[in-house]
Amino acid sequence: MINRQIASIVYQRLSSGVPAAVLLGPRQMGKTTLARQLAADWPQGAVYLDLELPSNRRRLEDPETYLRAQAPKLVVIDEIHRVPELFVVLRGLIDERRAAGQRYGHFLLLGSAAMELMQQSSETLAGRVAYLDMHAINLSEAISAGLSESVLWNRGGFPDSLLAQDDAHSMAWRQDFIRSYLERDVPMFAPRMPAETLGRLWTMLAHQQGGQINQAQLAASLGVSAPTVGRYIDLLTDLHLVRRLQPWFANVGKRLVKTPKVFVRDSGLVHALLGLKDENDVLGHPVAGASYEGFVLETLITQACPSLKPYFYRTHDGAEIDLLFERGGQPDIAIEVKRSSAPSPERGFKHACDDLGISQRYVVYPGNERFSLRQGAQAIGLQGMLELLNPT
C-alpha cells in the first residue's frame, strides 16, 4: 500500500472547522480506501455508507433521522450522486450542528463525476463544503514506495495498475477498467450516450495525445456532429479521464493558437487504449514522445502549488511553450518536455519565452542531473522540477 499525500490534507480540512468535504476523483483511484482509513482513525468515531449497496441505501430511507443519530461521528458517504436529495438533508443537519457549537468535520462525500457532484453540492451546501481532488499516485509517492519514474509512466497512477505483480497483470487491469467505465459509468452519467462511440473517441484522443483537437474531423470519423463530440469530451473531462489545457493569451502582436490541448490524463490508460503492453512497446510507438509529455504535464499540474495556473502557449509562426505557469496574472515559468537523455530546447521555445519576458526556462527530461542549456534554459529532471515548484 502507498501512503497518499492527500490523506493528511483531508484530515486537516475536516478537523479545522470545515463542516463537509467533497473528495473527487475517478473510480479505482483509492478514494474509498483513504476514506475508510480516515474513518477508522477519526477521534469521535465514524460511519461509512456506500450508496451502491442496497443495504446502505435502506439505512437512509429516513435520512434526517438516521444521520442526526450519528452525531458526533464523521459520516462518510460514498457514491453520493446516486441519492442527490441527500444534499438538502445535509444542509439542515450541518446548520443544526453548527448552532450547537460543533465545529469539526461532519461529512466526507465521495464521488467520481466532478461537474455533477459539484453542481449538486454547491446549490445546497454553499459555504459549508470544501472540494478536494484525489489524483493518480504521483511521482513522490511512487518513489517513496520503491517504484521508478519509468514504471509510473508505463503503468500509470491507478493503484491497482501500478502495484500489479507484472506488466501483463497491470495491462489486464487497465483494459478491464476501460471496459467497466464504458459499460457501467457512461450509461449511469449519460444514458443517451453510446458507450461504443465514446470508446472510439477515447482511443482517438490517445492517438492524438496532447494535440489540438479538430472536433469536426473527429465527428466525421465517428459519424456524429461536432457539438456531440464536444459533449463526449466534456463527459470524459468531468470523469477526470481527460484534461483540456487552455492556451495563454497575451497581447504580443502575434497570431496565437486558441484551441485547447486535449490529453488523456493517465499515461497508463493511453498505453492500454493503444494496446501497448509494456515499456518496449511504448518506446517503439509514435506516441512515446507525446505520452511522456502528457505524463510530465499531468504530474506538474496536479502537484504545482495552488498559486500557479497552467496553460500552454503557441503562435502560428512556431513559438511554443509546452507548459506555462502563470503567477499573479503574469507568465512566470516556461517548461518544455523532451524525452531524451541529451535534451535541447527548440528555437520556438526561446522565441516564446522572449515574447512573454520569461526568465525561468526549463527543459524537463528523464534524468536526474540539472545543467545549463543554450538560450537561457536549464535541463532538469521531473522530480527536480517538482521540488522547484513546491519547495519545502
Image (spheres, grey):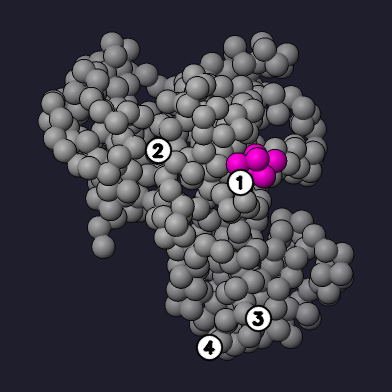
- Tell me the distance, in whole angstroms, between the alpha carbons under discs 4 and 3: 19 Å
Q: Which residue is mark 4?
A: 101
Which amino acid does the dot numbered 4 rest on?
Gly
Which amino acid does the dot numbered 3 rest on?
Ala
- Residue 222 placement, left or right of 352: right
Mark sitting on residue 308: none
Which dot, 3 or 1, sits closer to the camera?
Answer: 1
Which dot, 2 or 1, sits closer to the camera?
Answer: 1
Residue visible at 77% across and 27% down in the picture? 196
Which amino acid does the dot numbered 1 rest on?
Asp
Which dot, 4 or 1, sits closer to the camera?
Answer: 1
* Circle nearer the N terminus (4, 2): 4
Q: Quadrant of the C terminus?
A: bottom left
First to last magenta residue range: 166-172
Which amino acid does the dot numbered 2 rest on?
Leu
Quarter where residue 269 is shown: top right
Which dot, 4 or 3, sits closer to the camera?
Answer: 3
Residue visible at 49% across and 73% down in the picture? 11
Residue visible at 29% across and 36% down in the picture? 364
SS for callout 4: loop
Q: Which residue is mark 2?
A: 297
Q: Which residue is mark 1?
A: 166
Crowd class of label 1 (few under 14; some 14 to 19; many from 20; radius 10 Å): few
* Circle nearer the N terminus (3, 2): 3
Task: Check if residue 169 falls in the magenta segment.
Answer: yes
User: Compared to 32, does 207 lie above or below?
Assistant: above
